[in-house]
Image (cartoon, rainbow, N blue to C red):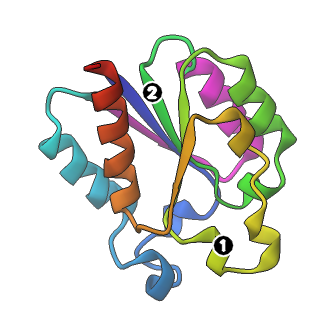
Amino acid sequence: MKIAIINGPNLNLLGKREPEIYGSSSFEDYFEKLTAKYPDLKLSYYQSNVEGELVNRLHEVGFDHDGILINAGAYTHTSVALSDAIAGIQTPVLEVHISNIYKREEFRHKSIISKECVGMIAGLGLLGYELGLQYFIQKENQ
């Protein structure tokens, strides 16, 4: 199985930015643990702070992967372009958020991309990514 993990703006600061919300581990360190734990999966990781680059990455992986985990960061709440990109690809996309977006500022309660995703995992920290992988694994084995 090929699964892409795509992270949006400011997620390059994991481990440094607001550790009380996002934890103290960098995503690169966490990704190493995921690849070691799931050696049979072909995992890729991409992060960008630029909306158009995220759209381009969705287009690149959206036709030959078995699943995409996306944490669009703040673009979750603002990006029609990401929503349209997800709608335009064939690979199923699962939305992931480290924090519980419904326990935060009200403007974060609305996800523009959710309607194009197969589901959402929010508020479980980095574990949400692993649970997303497990979703795709179980879906493949049904």
- Residue 112: percent from left, percent from top: 79, 48
Is the residue 63 above or below the residue 8 in the image? Answer: above
Circle 1: residue type: Tyr
- Residue depicted at x 73% and y 18%: 88
**Which of these two is toward me, 134 or 25?**
134
Q: Which residues are magenta?
A: 43-61
Instruction: Report how far apart the C-alphas of labels 2 and 1 lie in the structure.
Output: 25 Å
Instruction: Name the residue tied to disc 2.
Output: 67
Viewer-nearest residue: 44 or 130: 130
Q: Amino acid at mark 2?
A: Gly
- Where, by quadrant of the figure, is residue 45 drawn? top left
Q: Residue at left 29%, top 58%?
A: 30
Residue carrying label 1 = 102
The spot of residue 125 in percent (x, y) is 41, 68
Name the spot of residue 28 as percent of width and height, x first: 34, 55
How many marks the image carries: the answer is 2
Secondary element under disc 2, as helix, strand or loop, is strand
Q: Is residue 6 magenta?
A: no
Label annotation for residue 41: none
